[in-house]
Amino acid sequence: MRIGIDYRPVTISPYSGIGRQVLAMEEVLRARPQTTLELFSACPPGHPHRDIAHCPDSAIPVYRLHRPLPRWRFESQFLPAEVADLGLDLYIATANAGLPLGHKPANARYALLLHDVFQLTLDNRHRSWMTALAYRNLDRFAIGHSVKVADVIWTPSRYTASEVARLFPEHSAKLRVLPNCVSFHNGAAPPPELAAALPEGRYWLLVGTWEPRKNTTFFLDCLANARAHAVNGTEFPEVVIVGSPEDLAERHRHTPGVRFLNRLDDHSLQALYARAECFWHPAYAEGFGLPVVEALRNGTPVAVAHGSALDEVTPPGAVRFDPEDHEEVAALILELAAKPPTREPERWREWAEHFGPEPYAQRLNNLLHELAA
């Protein structure tokens, strides 16, 4: 079987959630017998991915690959001819859209890895309203096209599958659930530069600032409320947020007891999870909830919002809360500051194993067998 995958997410951001899923898929596909894997990306001359992937002859910087014109040229001009010339049996678009535009070769099949549809259902963060409008229209076209021409659509959760079915009911029969892969890390010591940036004592951890749905500002407002109502002598753990303070409003950028870390590689991020007293995830919308499972995989207790795909990845007995109830979350902050959540690392790791590399490989291979049959 000759399979091609869109490798652009790894080229653009290998440590992102989507980038790590593409790497996990690559590993499984390379291990399959009688399978040839072809990678497709776009990068400027001199980039190392030109040695391993099929790339167009362009000099576009990596940070611009997600923009409309480079995407259009890749998917309408470069990709269709490459898929046909290589005689692919299957091409997998890995980033919500990106299936080739134009004529589909008779013997080729298309799979779409659709992580979420928040581009279509939520107001996402952009530099201006004009940019937001342009990307909303582009995403509507790109996702709609890929959903239409895909032979199968893989989503990481039942929640995302239900949202896709709601938006595209005529294509609901194509939907299959392929939960994300969460690799195991042993909690090794953080690199020196990260260790120097960490608090000396207790700390709580949050991941994500750019997208409003991560609800980070809501948590910081609740934290301020809890501090205002705390009795004298209450000790709060420091809060470490993975993200940029520039993504938040001015009043949240210098919150007392909060520090920001940005541009971490995967090893540093896992070390950060492993040493946190509690991982907080206040997001009001998630297509899977990868950070929750990553924290659990490192044996770290979690406090997670109810709703969306988070209900599928959070184990029974974990701390839960309403992502819109300021008073409830402020009270919970006070409670966990005084009495940290119980550490049950083996229990949390056992739950996270459901999303480990071996179950992921089995699910992906089953889906490929189904598609081939």
Image (cartoon, helix red, strand yellow):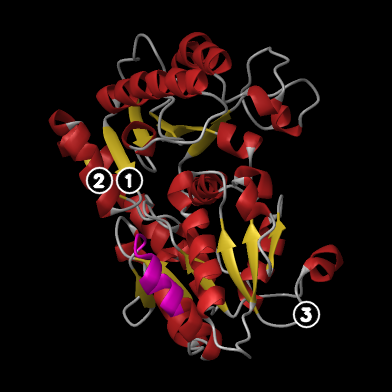
Label pair 2/1, CB-CB below 8 angstroms: yes
In the picture, which quadrant includes the C terminus? top left
Image quadrant where one finds the N terminus: top left
* Vertical position of residue 237 compared to residue 50: above or below: below
Where is residue 259? Give x, y as percent. 71, 63
Q: Secondary structure at mark 3?
A: loop
Local packing at callout 3 (Cα closer than 10 Å; few below 14, some 14-19, many 20+) is few
Does the magenta run of residues contain 275? no
Mark 2–mark 1 Cα distance, whole angstroms, equals: 6 Å
Circle 2 is placed at which residue position?
Answer: 161
Q: Is 172 on the left-hand or right-hand side of 27? A: left
Of the two numbered discs 3 and 2 on the same chain, state the one appearing first in sequence. 2
Residue 310 in sight in this render: yes
Q: Amino acid at mark 3?
A: Glu
Q: Which residue is mark 3?
A: 200
Badge 2: how crowded within 10 Å, few (<14), some, or many (20+)? many
Report the number of numbered marks. Answer: 3
Write the residue at 48% across / 90% down.
Answer: 342
Q: Which residues are magenta?
A: 323-332
In primary-sequence order, the first of circles 1 and 3 is 1
Picture residue at 45% right of the left edge, 42% below the top = 34
Dominant secondary-structure state across the stretch colored magenta: helix
Question: Along the horizontal axis of the image, is 229 left or right of 262?
Answer: left
Q: Residue at x 30, y 64 (%)?
A: 311
Measured in 3D between alpha carbons, the distance from the residue under mark 1 to the one under mark 3, in whole angstroms, is 40 Å
Q: Which mark is residue 155?
A: 1
Name which residue type carries label 1. Answer: Thr
